[in-house]
Image (cartoon, rainbow, N blue to C red):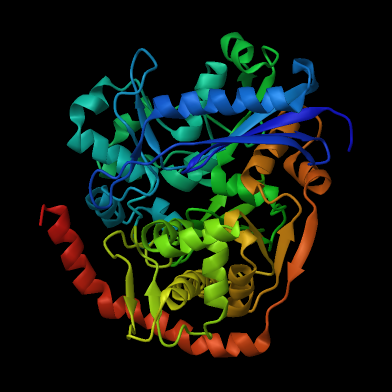
């Protein structure tokens, strides 16, 4: 392994913080993670405590530095990634005023509808259609309208990564990645969408959001002495501007050239692709100017609930299997995969809709929910689990269909995240979409992506593309099975047809439950 210099990547995901230390070839020296929980106070709502974020980060960073055995001066750069549209309200004393509203929270559906109703040209980022209630701007507007005291007291209204950068450096700055992808910032049109903000009477948003909007990898400031001393690093170590976790994951997969697309898996699925020219249309988001690479345009789409649904099924409905797994010395997921592999394509007639937290793409509908149909007394846990995996893969392909309809053909599905450990799931993705899948050597894509930005900020590499060339390495390819692809097509079409059939019923139920039943 190459000796130094080393960089630190900090990844704030939905389920916890993960800190990785890498050398300049992208080889990991050490990882350490600390989990934290999400609270769900009501249907469609999700919150986390920033105090827990910070305690978790300090624990993870201290452990990673200690286990690396490196001297403080050997770690020459730091950068970050975090969930986005995770809105935090910060008071005069730099303390949060309420729990952070998480990215998956869809309480701001009314505000999202009003933003969409403006028909402002900034809405090209949402395909000139519906605006997602997940996005940061509707959430910030919800705070102003539903919690005006909190909004008025907030000196800073920011996203999770902005908060983290501030805690590390003492500086307030946002990333063009976050500002464009979640708050309608458009460098091609001069920056902030003033006409849109006026239309919803929200010009005062800009009084609270970080003023500086920086490119990925730009140095924001040096590491504060008190933080450096606590985690064991050198004060003033350069901290580079970070990214949305999924976008950092795309960087960690080497998605830095036009035409490439990455699938970042975890609690959700996110697709990130690069284009040489602007693309706008319904069914996906963007394309965002300079959001990852200056001079390129980034398209995004995603499924709000994927890995989180798999975990929901394992944790809530697999008690007997968990005991079997413990007796055999394997993971419960291994047992579930074994059962699912014995079930034929189509799960013997089950169709599963993966909309547990609404639909992000291609429908941008926060009011729909999950569903399964076709059940019979002959179905067992293996059928259920396979139908969940198939439904998630069908959701991914539905998004790819929308992209293909707007002059973007995914060439390679480069994948990272926890689900890559399931060979069944990855082969299923390849077969359903008839796309080859490339797996990178470092599966911790977001942490590596953050480390790549740290390497640019530290001056090891001149730009993100050079960092990717030296730090991202492909390890394996999965080729699609044409026969399986043909079999999946019938079930995929039934999946696609389920949404319009169930949409109105689901909307009625969601609104009924949101109003207290």
**Residue 221 in the image, given as x and y percentages of width and height:** 62, 19
The answer to whether 244 appears left or right of 122 in the picture is right
* Closer-to-camera residue (236/211): 236
**Residue 390 in the image, given as x and y percentages of width and height:** 49, 75
Please state the total of marks drawn on the protein image: 0
Whether residue 197 is visible to the viewer of this picture, yes or no, is no
The answer to whether 170 appears left or right of 469 in the picture is left
Looking at the image, which residue sits at the far right?
Answer: 2
* Closer-to-camera residue (204/455): 455
Which corner quadrant holds the N terminus? top right
Q: Residue at 51% of width from left, 68% of height from top? A: 336
Q: Is residue 328 above or below residue 451?
A: below
Q: Residue at 80% of width from left, 52% of height from top? A: 473
Whether residue 90 is visible to the viewer of this picture, yes or no, is yes
**Residue 219 in the image, given as x and y percentages of width and height:** 66, 25
Q: Is residue 453 above or below residue 339?
A: above
Which corner quadrant holds the C terminus? bottom left
**Residue 438 in the image, given as x and y percentages of width and height:** 72, 64
Q: Residue at 58% of width from left, 69% of height from top? A: 425
Q: Is residue 268 above or below residue 438?
A: above
The answer to whether 229 appears left or right of 37 in the picture is right
């Amino acid at each position: 392994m190459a000796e130094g210099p080393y960089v630190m990547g900090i990844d704030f995901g939905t389920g916890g913080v993960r800190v990785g230390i890498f050398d300049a070839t992208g080889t990991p020296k050490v990882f350490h993670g600390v989990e934290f929980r999400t609270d769900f106070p009501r249907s469609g709502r999700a919150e986390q405590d920033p105090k827990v974020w910070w305690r978790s980060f300090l624990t993870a960073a201290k452990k990673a530095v200690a286990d690396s055995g490196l001297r403080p001066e050997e770690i020459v750069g730091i950068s970050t990634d975090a969930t986005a549209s995770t809105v935090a309200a910060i008071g005069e004393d730099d303390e949060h005023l309420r729990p952070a509203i998480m990215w998956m929270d869809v309480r701001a559906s009314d505000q999202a509808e009003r933003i969409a109703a403006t028909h402002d040209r900034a809405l090209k980022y949402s395909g000139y259609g519906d605006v997602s209630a997940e996005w940061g701007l509707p959430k910030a507007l919800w705070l102003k309208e539903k919690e005006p005291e909190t909004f008025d007291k907030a000196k800073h209204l920011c996203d999770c990564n902005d908060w983290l950068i501030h805690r590390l450096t003492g500086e307030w700055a946002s990333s063009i990645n976050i500002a464009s992808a979640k708050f309608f910032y458009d460098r091609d049109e001069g920056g902030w969408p003033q006409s849109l903000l006026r239309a919803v009477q929200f010009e005062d948003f800009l009084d609270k959001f970080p003023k500086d909007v920086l490119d990925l990898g730009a140095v924001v400031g040096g590491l504060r002495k008190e933080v450096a001393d606590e985690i064991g690093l050198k004060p003033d170590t350069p901290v580079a501007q970070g990214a949305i976790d999924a976008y950092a994951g795309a960087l960690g997969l080497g998605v830095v050239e036009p035409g490439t697309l990455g699938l970042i898996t975890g609690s959700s699925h996110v697709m990130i692709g690069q284009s040489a020219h602007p693309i706008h249309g319904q069914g996906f988001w963007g394309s965002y100017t300079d959001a990852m690479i200056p001079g390129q345009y980034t398209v995004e789409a995603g499924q709000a609930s994927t890995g989180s649904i798999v975990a929901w099924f394992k944790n809530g409905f697999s008690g007997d299997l968990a005991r079997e797994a413990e007796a055999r010395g394997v993971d419960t997921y291994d047992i579930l995969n074994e059962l699912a592999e014995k079930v034929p394509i189509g799960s013997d007639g089950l169709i599963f809709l993966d909309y547990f937290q609404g639909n992000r793409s291609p429908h941008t509908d926060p009011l729909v929910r999950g569903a399964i149909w076709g059940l019979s007394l002959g179905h067992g846990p293996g059928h259920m689990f396979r139908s969940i995996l198939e439904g998630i893969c069908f959701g991914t392909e539905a998004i790819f269909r929308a992209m293909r309809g707007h002059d973007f053909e995914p060439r390679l599905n480069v994948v990272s995240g926890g689900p890559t450990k399931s060979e069944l799931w990855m082969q299923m993705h390849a077969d359903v979409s008839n796309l080859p899948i490339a797996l990178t050597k470092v599966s911790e894509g977001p942490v590596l992506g953050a480390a790549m930005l740290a390497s640019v900020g530290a001056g090891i590499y001149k730009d993100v593309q050079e960092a990717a060339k030296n730090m991202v390495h492909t390890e394996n390819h999965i080729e699609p099975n044409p026969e399986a692809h043909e079999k999946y097509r019938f079930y995929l079409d039934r999946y696609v047809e389920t949404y319009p059939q169930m949409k109105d019923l689901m909307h009625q139920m969601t609104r009924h439950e949101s109003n207290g039943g």
